Image (cartoon, helix red, strand yellow):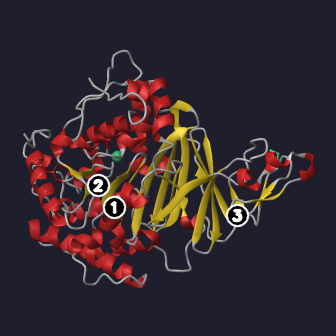
Amino acid sequence: MTDLYAVEDHTQYRRRKTAEVVERCSKLDGPASRLTDDECGPDRIPKEVYTSRDWFDLEKEYLWPHVWQIACREHDIPEVGDYFEYEIVDETILIVRTGPATIKAYFNVCQHRGRKLKEGCGRAERLRCGYHGWCWDLEGNVVEILDPFDFRPETIRSVDLALKPVQVDTWGGFVFVNMDSDAPPLSEAIAPMPARVDRYLPERLRLKSWKRIVLPINWKVGVDAFHEGYHAFGTHPQLAGYMDDTRTGLYERWDNGMTLLGASNWLETMAMPSRRFGINPDPKDVLMTMLEDLINSGVLSGDDLALLDLVKDMEFPPGDEGLELIRSMFAGYRRTQMATLGVDVSEWPDSDVVAPEQFLLFPNTVGPLQLGTGLFFRFRPNGDDHRSCIFDYWDMQFYPLGEEPDVTVEDVADTSLESWGQLVYQDLVNLLAVGRGMRSRGFSGPRFGYQENNLKFYYRKLAEMLGWKGQPRVPAY
Ligand code: FES
Ligand SMILES: [Fe+2]
């Protein structure tokens, strides 16, 4: 009988393939400094990284005010005067479109008595405070003070009353902010991401669905769950019918905190059941399993369903030849789909047309991005609470230009299968159970293996940040 857990060579396989990717992409990566597998970080960390209030307070002081983080999409503020409030821990930041091609960000606070200036999102020619009516223009200059003669002139100098700026920049249609005016530029913080994935036109992605929920877990429990492929076999068993988990997980990491889970071997792993099964698959079975699951999990929908009609009566040659045919059919289908959207990828290799790059935008957004679609999972603390977090789920895709739907956030009340679909539901079940389990006296902290090198690296990087200005507090075990 096949032992499902004894596929011994996959680590060697990953090391070999990752080396090939590194070789091929090193020119693209520019000055980003890459880490080897052995430089990742600790195999064990104490559970207090997730559970202690002290650790959370360090993050509050040394992480969040100093990292570039996604605040919104550019299309959330399409017109001049549109604003969007981004909240992180105790801070509230207002992102404002000040011109057709310019965006600014300010700490969202009135300089009179400290009222939060704006709530949520909206459009305004001027930013007026709701308390005593003081008013700022979009550039952050104070333009109205009620009864200014009642104040000593030195109390209300314009230069002091300007809204306090926050660094803002954009990439791939995302608007990023950084509260630290001395922080290095965004381009440095996210290299080599743009070089790797700009060809997928991420700026064209538009929301198909945005769901949000507050979960009773530390925010990093959420990041962890979407940041390694090791859990696929145990958590998402349906994937094993058409995606070989022993051949995924070609991770690459950079010194600035970026991680890519490259899918450069997509054409070897998709339309291929897990090698743990040790079976010689029937191509038609694999294809139907794959389509059924992609439809169930919402990855394929709408026009994509035509694919099902196209293939259901087709015959496939047995063995590898049939599997190859399935993969090239998918690539062909995607090429046609892109052509109808005005994106010409006729010259691209199959792997580029269909393979996703999954990445971590340090510290809190993970997701697979490929040509035509993107799925992003963001976790941030729920205000000042170290035991709960806000999970944003952004499902995006290309639309014909001018036909993009106007999607806004949907606050979801429960973690049910109906609300989230099979794939995310399976992950949510784990998140809640980990959040509950790790508080037990019977658990001292996680242990990471080779396939969780991303997590080793993540916690090393985080510890570096937290020790940056205060006392170094590298989690050691
Ligand atoms: S607090 Fe804003 S105008 Fe007074
Ligand atoms: Fe998962």
Mark 1 = which residue?
A: 193
Alpha carbon distance from label 3 to label 2: 37 Å
Picture quadrant where residue 202 is located: bottom left
The residue drawn where x is 50% and y is 62% is 169
* Image height of 435 relative to 325, above or below: above
Dot 1 amino acid type: Met
Q: Which mark is residue 335?
A: none
Q: Residue at x 68, y 63 (%)?
A: 139
Q: Which residue is mark 3?
A: 138
SS under mark 1: helix
Q: Are marks 1 and 2 in contact (CB under 8 Å)?
A: yes
Name the one closer to the observer, 36 or 283: 36
Residue 260: which disc? 2
**Within the image, what quadrant is residue 435 found in?**
top left
Which of the two labelled residues, at mark 3 and mark 2, occupies the earlier sequence position? 3
Q: Is residue 406 left or right of residue 230?
A: right
Q: On the picture, is 326 further left or further right than 404?
A: left
Residue 181, how many percent across, how many down? 52, 51
Q: Position of residue 359 (x, y in %)?
A: 33, 55
